[in-house]
Amino acid sequence: MSQSQSLKLAALAGDGIGPEVMREAIKVLRAVENKHGKKFGFSIEITEAPVGWAGIDAAGKALPDATLALCKQSDAILFGSVGLPDRDPTIPKEERPERAALLRLRKEFGLFANLRPVVLSKALAHACPLQPDRQGDGIDILVVRELTGGMYFGRPKETTDLGDGKKKAVDTMVYTTDEIARIAHVGFRAARLRRKKLTSIDKANVLENGVLWRDVVTAVAKEYPDVTLEHMFVDNGAMQLMLKPTQFDVMLCENMFGDILSDEAAALAGSLGMLPSASLGQTTGEKTFGVYEPAGGTAPDIAGKNLANPIAQIASAALMLQYSFGLNEAGVAVHNAIAKVIADGLRTGDIYSAHDAKARKVGTSEMGDAIATAVAG
Ligand code: NAD
């Protein structure tokens, strides 16, 4: 990245707990800017805008035109979450925030890669459904999922009548060399920022798509000789996640396998409040546009009570520093700050255990303050 660059960020907090956790992420980004801005020559320009029901209330649309315009002028979007199940049930499906805001953004910015890191530190062993002896020194997996191809979008996709009340449903799994190579590059580049191992998931023993997937990933791997590549069938991958999750660094998956395995892996982290995500579009020059957001939703049951865990939002901001802003060291500093406050015993309600003598229950803002302080320290 060139010197003294101003990085433009659109902060769309959305509904429910969105504004509460976004506030903490911005606090941490300001601490990052103070600590690392001079050294690495950057400043962060943050502009907030309404989305979701907040967008409908402000401008009659879940993704107001002004919000979309802001996103287009920005280098990345930090997104909270949208949707409130109890609001106006009569509004048509396509105008509801989940579709009109999120899916629209995905389409508008051609987001084809979804990154879901799953981190479980030793201090949160109790929150993981696996026995401690299967958790090793902690779990740290990145699921890289292709987002725009495969069975979810392939044509034909239809249900036909066979008569006698019987029907036939067809979905089609399609991938091209270019689509596989594009996501494979994202996976290998991510592995380079981590422990340099990539496990490519496929079903090459049964599916033509799997054979092509394996061939293309193997070819792309030649450009990343420093990354160790292994191939694994998806059924074995699902089993290995439960048996020995510590063997994985980056898991590279097509759309449907990634959808399923990322949720399975997510269960290992113990709480939705710990899970960030990134959806990336094309890289132009040094820049990769991305939407960064918590894996969870608006959590209406705890909204407005200072109970939400802000870590998913803060870790999403850290991914943004790494993947869109090219500030890997600053991003890692945020991940380390999160690890430090967890090791120090700070817990929001979702990750608290009364059996942990070291644990101290805190609210959303205190957790954000502690992470910002750890970044500054
Ligand atoms: P949810 O993820 O909002 O909540 C599920 C459970 O997880 C709740 O008990 C909640 O309290 C808890 N939880 C989630 N995030 C948390 C956090 N940061 N800290 C502590 N606890 C947390 O899922 P839901 O209840 O099924 O959905 C609520 C609304 O959110 C719906 O309108 C749904 O459509 C929407 N939603 C939006 C997104 C998005 O914007 N990307 C994603 C999922 C759901």
Image (cartoon, helix red, strand yellow):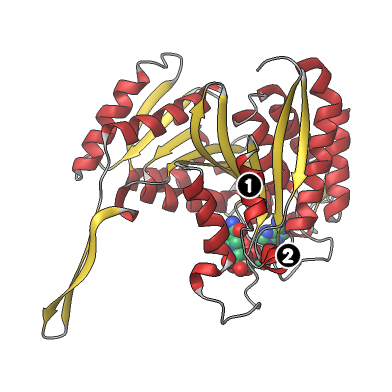
Amino acid identity at mark 2? Ala
Q: Give the residue drawn at x 89%, y 35%.
A: 373
Amino acid at the residue labelled 1: Ala
| Location of the N terminus (image quadrant) | top right
Determine whether 227 is above or below 241 in the image: above
Rendering quarter of residue 338: top right
* Left or right of residue 205: residue 44: right
The quadrant in which the C terminus is found is top right
As helix, strand or loop, the secondary structure at mark 1 comes to helix
Label 2 residue near ligand 1, CB within 8 Å: no
Expressed as whole percent of the image width and height from the top left, the position of residue 240 reads 42, 43
- The image shows residue 311 at horizontal and vertical percentages of 73, 47
- At 60% from the left edge and 52% from the top edge, which residue is drawn? 295
Q: Is residue 91 above or below residue 70?
A: below
Q: Is residue 248 visible?
A: no
Q: Which residue is mark 2?
A: 58
Residue bearing the label numbered 1? 69
Residue situated in front as seen by the camera: 66 or 187: 66
Front-most of residues 129 and 25: 25
